[in-house]
Amino acid sequence: MSKQKSNSSWRNQLHEIIYEADTPAGKFFDLSLLVVILLSIVLVMLESIEPIGTKYALIFNSLEWIITVLFSLEYIARIVCVKKPRAYIFSFYGIVDFLSTVPKYISLFVVGTNSLLALRALRLLRVFRILKLTRFIGESTNFGRALKRSKIKIAVFLSFVLVLCIILGTVMYLVEGDKNSGFTSIPRSVYWAIVTLTTVGYGDIAPISALGQFIASLIMILGYGIIAIPTGIVTSEMSRKERKNIPKNTQSCSSCTESYHADDAQFCHKCGLPLHHG
């Protein structure tokens, strides 16, 4: 009985350090992890520069192995300290952790794994988990709620933009289709409309008639107004006076790994099991 209690105690302590940030140890762990993640991303970027990657290949390889071992130990620790490992392993961040760690091990058995650099770059996604630090938790939760409340409005807006691009592309095809200016089909003209409306303007297709140039000018001006609309929608939702109800703690359930509980919560709002309080 005493041994079981001891095992439970160290697992709870490990869980509090790894999954939460309310203690000095938890904050130190998150900040250390942030430094390692950023270092690994810098290594991936420098390694992609051929002169630098070739010259310092041995150093980069050694540092990458050190970082991979650290991430592997962290991954194992996250599995060990939760009561239901599958909840973490098959969660979004669990999959990201695995995919961002495994490429280096694959390189031991498969030659030419440069294409797996993209998986190593997934480590940058882990920064969002570390933003659970107390000073960021309220703002990040507020932003997440604003996006959820805005999703219907944004979906309607994007549908309108899509329909508008199809109409504008069709019009430009009718105007420019016989003038050898690149508007060879409606899909290609719709592509031009999307590029122009978003103010990207690759320049691979351009109208040559006066009417086509006039329509293009209107689309460009329209694009400036359309780009600002999604920002306004989300900003409007974020300005709602609901911040006082946003939880500020970093309490994480040791069973299902659910986070963002109310400040005075005693039980997990997802699985109902008691929360461990340090």
Image (cartoon, rainbow, N blue to C red):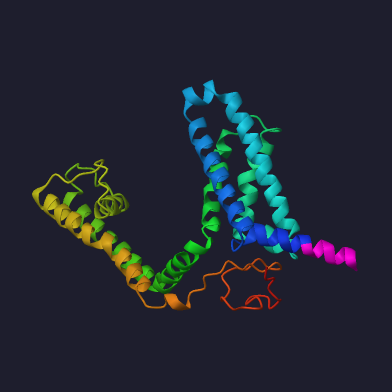
Q: Quadrant of residue 174?
A: bottom left
Point 59% across, 64% down: residue:
22
Residue 237 location (% of width, % of height): 36, 73
Which residue appears farthest toward the right when viewing the image?
1
Q: Quadrant of the N terminus?
A: bottom right
Residue 43 in sight here: yes
Left or right: 32, with 202 as reference point: right
Which residue appears farthest toward the left when viewing the image?
210
Query: Which residue is at the front of the view, 190 or 58?
Result: 58
Is residue 63 located in the magenta-colored stretch of the structure? Answer: no
Left or right: 62, with 235 as reference point: right
Q: Quadrant of residue 228?
A: bottom left
Point 32% across, 64% down: residue:
231
Which residue appears farthest toward the front when viewing the image?
24
Question: Which residues are drawn in magenta?
Answer: 1-9
Residue 90 in sight here: no
Q: Quadrant of the C terminus?
A: bottom right
Residue 154 location (% of width, % of height): 36, 68
Query: Which residue is at the front of the view, 63 or 224?
Result: 63
Query: Which residue is at the front of the view, 200 or 102?
Result: 102
Secondary structure, magenta segment, majority class: helix
